[in-house]
């Protein structure tokens, strides 16, 4: 921690510059320059300093921003409802502190129910259906403006081009994650090696590179998948939707949209921690890469009461797993002893 405002000013400037550069490499070039764990550490240091020295607040700080700019080679799409990021918890205590913050804010000690979802390590995508037909798909971009990747998303095998059922909203925006399952990722890298082409660093990087292709024929050959995790715009506003997030996900499934098979619900912070441990224990056996789990207050009216801060909803949090790069290092060290 910096002791003086002058020192903090310098440290904050260095961290912002560094994080802006990481973001550019990661979100715009799809070519991360540092492991996620290092990014997360620098971001936590910046957040801590900004909290300690509120005078250093800046709306342009990477701590206030979502993702990266949309590439100009794609048509740009302005999101009607911004696509935000998630706050992070890095240990059990911060998850329980999150639950306490919610209860304090709600002035209600009743146990909260949560939707629990693996945090898929891919890219957030918005898919718009009008009268049940897929009309547009976009990346998150900086949360306000993303890239139009409709042609590419259409090639993803489990994305329905038409929704099922008779009672559909006139317009509905489905949000979720496009990712590359581990098996497909290994096969893709084998093929890349055979062709002496670039090998992808990890499934997230491979998914991002595959989805942001200007030629959708290339995307079509990549083993991408999509799982839905929320709704954006729904019109008409009076359209009858269930009152909990988990039931809304089931509604999406009834329309033919794919859901992650490992989602669940939990009662209170301790229920969330049980889910975290369950998923952490089977992480390696899962067919897709995850970097944590996401907890969302299940009751939509409570979500509305809680609202949003600059870059994330107050009613949700991502509890991150120990980074795999770091786990590998730890294991190496253990073997050396
Ligand atoms: P985030 O990844 O922490 O959380 C938001 C994202 O989670 C959403 O946009 C969505 O894509 C995803 N997500 C997955 N499953 C979800 C679910 N069930 N419900 C809701 N969202 C779900 O935020 P972010 O802003 O996308 O990225 C920040 C993280 O990315 C950092 O913590 C770091 O790990 C990594 N990062 C790394 C670098 C680097 O240089 N290595 C640079 C930037 C970001």
Image (cartoon, rainbow, N blue to C red):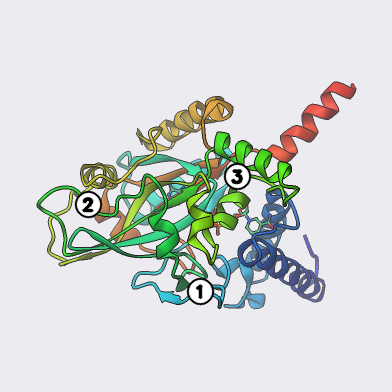
Q: Are the residues flagged by discs 3 and 1 in contact, CB closer than 8 Å?
A: no
Q: Kindly tell me whether residue 74 is visible in this rendering.
A: yes
Residue 43 in percent (x, y) is at 67, 59
Task: Identify the mark at residue 163; answer none if there is no mark.
Answer: 2
Q: Kindly tell me whether residue 323 is visible in this rendering.
A: no
Task: Identify the mark at residue 311; answer none if there is no mark.
Answer: none
Front residue (pair 125, 192):
192
Instruction: Answer with the quarter of the image where residue 303 lies.
Output: bottom left
- Residue pushed farthest front? 195
Residue 198 in percent (x, y) is at 72, 52
- Residue pushed farthest right? 337
Q: Give whichever of discs 1 and 2 has the lower sequence position.
A: 1
| 186 displayed left or right of 133 | right
| 18 displayed left or right of 264 | right
Residue beneath disc 3? 203
Instruction: Answer with the quarter of the image where residue 264 lies.
Output: top left
Neighbour tally class for label 2: few under 14, some 14-19, many 20 plus, Cα within 10 Å: many
Q: Give whichever of discs 3 and 2 has the lower sequence position.
A: 2
Residue beneath disc 1? 74
Residue 138 in percent (x, y) is at 42, 65
């Amino acid at each position: 921690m910096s002791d003086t405002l002058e020192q903090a000013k310098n440290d904050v400037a260095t961290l912002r510059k560094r994080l802006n550069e990481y973001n550019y490499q990661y979100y715009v070039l799809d070519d991360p320059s540092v492991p996620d764990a290092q990014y997360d550490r620098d971001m936590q240091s910046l957040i801590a300093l900004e909290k300690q020295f509120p005078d250093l607040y800046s709306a342009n700080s990477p701590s206030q921003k979502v993702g990266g700019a949309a590439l100009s080679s794609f048509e740009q799409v302005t999101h009607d409802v911004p696509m935000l990021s998630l706050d992070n918890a890095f240990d059990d205590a911060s998850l329980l502190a999150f639950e306490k913050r919610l209860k304090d804010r709600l002035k209600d000690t009743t146990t909260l129910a949560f939707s629990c979802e693996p945090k898929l390590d891919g890219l957030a995508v918005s898919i718009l259906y009008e009268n049940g037909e897929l009309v547009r798909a976009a990346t998150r971009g900086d949360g306000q403006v993303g890239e139009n990747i409709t042609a590419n998303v259409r090639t993803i095998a489990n994305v329905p081009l038409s929704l099922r059922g008779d009672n559909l909203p006139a317009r509905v925006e489905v949000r979720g994650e496009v990712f590359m399952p581990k098996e497909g990722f290994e096969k893709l890298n084998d093929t890349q090696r055979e062709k002496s082409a670039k090998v992808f660093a990890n499934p997230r990087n491979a998914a991002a590179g595959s989805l942001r292709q200007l030629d959708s024929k290339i995307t079509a050959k990549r083993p991408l998948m999509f799982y839905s995790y929320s709704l954006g715009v729904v019109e008409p506003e009076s359209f009858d939707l269930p009152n909990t997030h988990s039931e809304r996900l089931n509604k999406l499934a009834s329309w033919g949209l794919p859901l992650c098979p490992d989602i669940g619900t939990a009662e209170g912070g301790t229920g969330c921690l049980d889910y975290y441990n369950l998923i952490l224990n089977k992480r390696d056996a899962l067919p897709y890469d995850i970097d944590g789990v996401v907890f969302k207050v299940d009751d939509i009216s409570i979500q509305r009461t809680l609202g949003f801060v600059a870059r994330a909803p107050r009613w949700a949090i991502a509890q991150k797993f120990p980074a795999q790069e770091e786990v590998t290092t730890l294991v190496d060290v253990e073997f050396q002893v």
